[in-house]
Amino acid sequence: MEITILKKDEQNIQYILEGVDVAFANALRRTMLTRLPAMAIDEVLVLENTSVMYDEMLAHRMGLVPITTVLEDYNLPDECDCEGKGCSLCQCTLTLEKEAGDDEMLIYARDLTSQDPKVVPASGDIPLVKLAPHQRVIIEAYARLGRGVENAKFQPVATVAYKYVPLVTVDKSKCNQCGDCVEVCPKKILRLDGDKIATQNTLDCTLCEACVDECEPGAITIDSKSDSFLFKVESTGALPPEEIVVKSAALLKERVQVALDFANSL
């Protein structure tokens, strides 16, 4: 197995995974979505709320705020010595206490105060509730680790998708260089280079085969590598995208080993 990183920033990573089959690629995708833990607000104690928003709705909105996660610092509740009762090793407390003055006030995720500076909203610009003059909210919330299989709010990825690595081939002996394929291609994969058709940015190809239908039979061939996949991973901000990939691969390897050990024991 070989991984080649193409693009990476704070929220996204794009890479090519080679030397695996589609079953492994999909297992890795599902691991990122459902098995890799991330922090999220799971319990909300509303001490006072005089806004027009119902307590349940406000608690739901807070639960969907992505929370930055340090996996090494916290235990999963079902693996903690407190047996899921809640302690400093498996949960983090965030508080919110705001009161509007004579003007309206919009409360944002950045207004949450965390007992752990490493566990904070991934984006402080997420609006939570608008307070009318002299309205007030006092809230105590508890964030914990969870998995996407339990609730979507624990997913560390906003999107994770893959596709086969496309192969675009132009047969010069059958191509008459009319340029129709260049015009019909939605991703501009083909270009007219002098008196011949050339390819560019082939990884952007969606395998729609519009160029194949437009040209003479056999002039352009669209194929894909059966053991290579182009992955695009977008983080919610809970974890860095490269950490999502590395830890998901390690988690998948661990789960496969457990399955093999069980099979060998039969």
Image (spheres, rainbow, N blue to C red):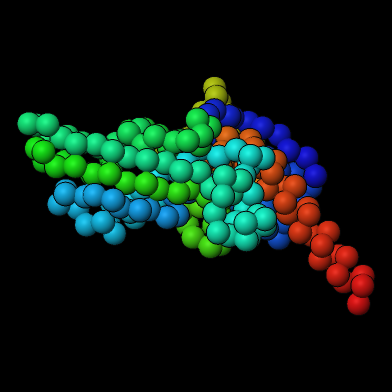
Coordinates of residue 176 in the picture (x, y in percent): 55, 38
Coordinates of residue 132 in the picture (x, y in percent): 11, 41
Q: Is residue 138 visible?
A: yes
Q: Is residue 9 above or below residue 76?
A: above
Q: Quadrant of the C terminus?
A: bottom right
Q: Residue at 37% across / 53% down in the picture? A: 44
Quadrant housing residue 88: top right
Among all residues in the image, which is located at the extreme top? Answer: 194
Residue nearer the viewer, 144 or 179: 144
Q: Is residue 141 above or below residue 14?
A: below
Residue nearer the viewer, 194 or 176: 194
Among all residues in the image, which is located at the extreme bottom? Answer: 266
**Count of numbered circles in the view:** 0
Q: Residue at 55% across / 59% down in the picture? A: 85
Q: Residue at 75% across / 47% down in the picture? A: 250
Residue 122 appears left or right of 21? left
Quadrant housing residue 82: bottom right
Q: Quadrant of the N terminus?
A: top right
Coordinates of residue 170 in the picture (x, y in percent): 63, 39
Q: Is residue 208 visible?
A: no
Residue 213 appears left or right of 109? right
Q: Is residue 44 above or below residue 231?
A: below
Residue 45 appears left or right of 210? left
Coordinates of residue 63 in the picture (x, y in percent): 40, 51
